[in-house]
Image (cartoon, rainbow, N blue to C red):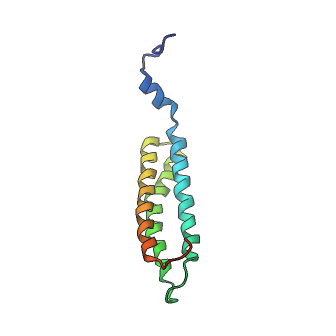
Amino acid sequence: MNWFADGGDQSTMALDTVNFRKVAALIAAAGTLFWLYTFYAIAHVPPGDGTGFQWLAVFPLGMVFGLFFLPAWLLVAIGRLPRFTAALGVCGLIAFAVLWAQLLQEFPRAVL
């Protein structure tokens, strides 16, 4: 059996089998679902002083969604730069994790 019949090596063949467009779409879907979950979680934060300032957390979360996941969805839809799109989505997930960890420390203790 000739493993190199097409002139490529195994590492190139392994990268060709990974469909980065699907991976990028899954990452963008995960980020979008988490962003939607944050609305639910913020709505269930117990009112601290009754001012509703917990809803200000929507703005930085929305900025992360707009900067990382909207472009990722656009790039997935048009089929351009799939590896960059997957990396962009991973960076967005990291940004969500850092931001959400900070917000959890600021919210009153609840069942989040």
Query: Residue 94, located in which quarter of the rendered image?
Result: bottom left
Residue displayed at 46% across by 71% down: 104
Query: Residue 34, located in which quarter of the rendered image?
Result: bottom right
Q: Which of these two is toward me, 32 or 78?
A: 32
Number of numbered discs present?
0
Compared to 87, does 9 lie above or below?
above
> Horizontal placement of 68 versus 26: left or right?
left
Residue displayed at 49% across by 72% down: 58
Residue displayed at 57% across by 59% down: 33
Q: Which of these two is toward me, 81 or 111?
A: 111
Compared to 99, does 73 lie above or below?
above
> Horizontal placement of 30 versus 92: left or right?
right
> Horizontal placement of 100 versus 39: left or right?
left
Compared to 98, does 55 lie above or below?
below
Residue displayed at 56% across by 71% down: 41
Compared to 22, does 57 lie above or below?
below
Q: Position of residue 91 (x, y in %)?
A: 41, 53
Which quadrant is the C terminus positioned in? bottom right
Q: Position of residue 90 (x, y in %)?
A: 44, 51
